[in-house]
Amino acid sequence: MTIQYPNTLDYSVDTPEQVIECDVVIVGSGAGGGIAAEVLSRSGFKVLIIEEGPLKTSADFKMKEKEAYAELYQEVTGRQTADKSIQILQGRAVGGSTTVNWTSSFRTPKSTLEHWQKEHAVNGLSSTELSPWFDWVEKRLNISPWTTPPNTNNQLLADGARKLGWKYNVIPRNVKGCANLGYCGMGCPIDAKQSMLVSCIPTALNLGAKLISRARVESLVIEGDKTVGVRLTSMNNLGQIKQKNITTVKAKHTILSAGAIGTPAIMLRSQLSTINPLIGKRTFLHPVTISMAEMPSKVNAFSGAPQSIYSDHFLWRDGVAGELGYKIEVPPLHPLLVSTMLKRHDQQHSEQMKKFANNQANLALLRDGFNEQSIGGSVMLDEYDYPQLNYSPNDMLWRGAKHAMLSMAEMQFAAGAKKVFPVHMDSLGYTSWNETKTAINNLPQEILRWQLVSAHVMGGSAMGKDPQESVCNNDGAFHQLQSLSVLDGSLFPTSLGVNPQLTIYAIIAKLSIKLAENLGGKLPVDLAI
Amino acid sequence: MNRRFFLKSVIGTSITLLGGITAFQWYQNNSLEYPENLPTKFLNQDDQLLITILVPVMLGDLLHTPDLDTSIVNIDETIIRLPLRTQAELRELFDLLGSSIGRLVLAGVWLNWQQAGAKQISAFLTDWRESNLSLLQQAYTGLHQLMISSVYAEPKHWEAIGYPGPPKLF
């Protein structure tokens, strides 16, 4: 059955209305905004969703990197931190990053939630309190551990871990009728991935919510100590500004769900940092370091569910607040992304590309933000009022990256690799574990040369009890203004240690219901938890 | 020192190392003829020329010759989707390169650059890659990202690396 998307308007095409009124305006349609849109629509509110990216659906998804990266990602996948040290893969389309993520769905680790409670005065989000919300989301988005055998790329992670006696396990995925294609990152062409694009967003739209795509929120409209709506700028089909402040939205309540770069950017453009200087501070990335390996036979890491096996063997290697721990997973390998990851040229590049199909890759995402040395980054505005993230890798991060690189390489040799290539501009291929160990220990720990990426942007509008220590309270309400909430991953006071989508879904479901209740809504029975 | 001046002087040094002094003299004494250019939105004639020179060297030994017009269009289509800040940085980089290397080549310094010239260009790229100056490293990675992706985005280069392309659905 084809999914229906009624009540949508594309600002790159249509002439917009000048003033729109609604009960609740939700800025962003990703993991946070999608859940909030469903909950508030089902609670009887007149909802308007604003999305800066385009509305693209499965009929548009052709599994081609060139088109997908241009249409569905921030900055054609080339978003990066200010010093260009970390490349950030982030969605920009209806459904946000859930439209292009690799479907990994983990519950928040108990240790992370305990740390938030203990160190960041977060209340109401213990594992026990979140458990019914995880149950609800897992049912809603059909999340369960992947039962199909892993593809070779993932199997080799399992093989390496097993040989070394390290823990590994199967990844739960949000899919229904998945055909094991391997193209989740380019938008699911068969609507199997239960992203916000095929679940909560259409549910909200079919209940009467409206969605404007290709519109960016320029700033909040504030009267006294109350937020009364937002100003919209229309975007063209290249994602560039068409006309600034073309529309005013009047709303009884405003929800920012624009992600951990977009949400602080809106608050900064609204000059809110004068009343809360912590806006955009402590932004976390789960910085990722990667190790490639040449296997004796074909891996075809572009085919099959991209992520199905993980290892948490080193996630808490030095306790919660010690040296940075990391989660090991694999990335899918498609030609365009792999070719740009190999930062060399001429024959050195082409020779390595010839081995493309034999490549296996492990990635380690580093759990940043859990101690005083891991302070994350900060979102600023550039001269065009466009957000930019400052995030400087420090010694603690480099130590973590090196430890992770060593572990991943060791796993690859244990799994039978002929050659291992740490993804670093100064690394050559190495044929033995001993040689690799020495090489990794000597790789310069320098930005650009040690290639870091991120697919998880979190924090920057941290929640907590104390207005001096946080941006929002434990309900996600902005401390210093009425009628303004943040409902997305920017609420997190640290990173998570797991891929963030399920954490965002569950926490935002819980906070959205609370908001619906406070606004006098009629709660849906299944959500009256 | 402002960033633009700094970058210019650094590039100037690189050119000198390549024997750029005589090249410039040669260039000054000759009128330039540009190849036919494509209707791009960001890239100008100089940029297009630069791309046709750099892409084959960046990519190395490919089974199929890259279609340079496609690369130019792909790069242009990418850049016009980038934030204005990034576009401004790239404009600066292309302008500086265009006024140095591209014109040296166009002026006939490397008449057979596909052979002898390619080696020099490759060495030049290596210099940038290995430079201690982060600006030059950034220029390298920026150009690398645009040029490499403009080629491997295209199906004709997939078979040679063992990538069958997306599965047929129905």
Image (cartoon, coloured by chain):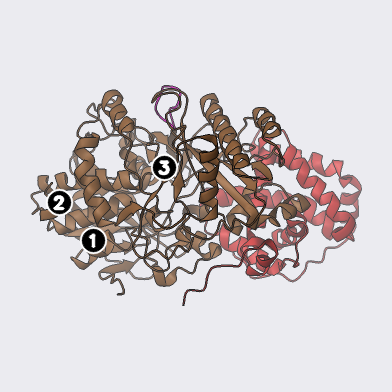
Chain colours: A brown, B red
Label of residue A19 in the image: 1
In this rendering, which labeled residue sits more in front, label 3 or label 1?
3
Secondary structure category for the residue under label 2: helix
* Picture residue at 38% right of the left edge, 57% below the top: A52
Tell me if I can see residue A208 in this picture. Answer: yes
Task: Give residue A457's quadrant in the image.
Answer: top left
- Amino acid under label 2? Leu
Q: Is the residue marked by circle 1 packed among few (<14), some (14-19), or many (20+) residues within 10 Å? A: few
Q: Are marks 2 and 3 on the same chain?
A: yes
Label of residue A527 in the image: 2
Foreground pick, A423 / A295: A295
The residue marked by circle 2 belongs to what chain?
Answer: A
Residue A194 at x, y percent in the picture: 33, 59
A73 lies above or below A385: below
Residue A475 at x, y percent in the picture: 20, 38
- Amino acid under label 1? Val
Q: Report how far apart the C-alphas of labels 2 and 3 lie in the structure.
A: 28 Å
Highlighted magenta segment, given as a residue range: A368-376
The residue marked by circle 1 belongs to what chain?
Answer: A
In this rendering, which labeled residue sits more in front, label 2 or label 1?
2
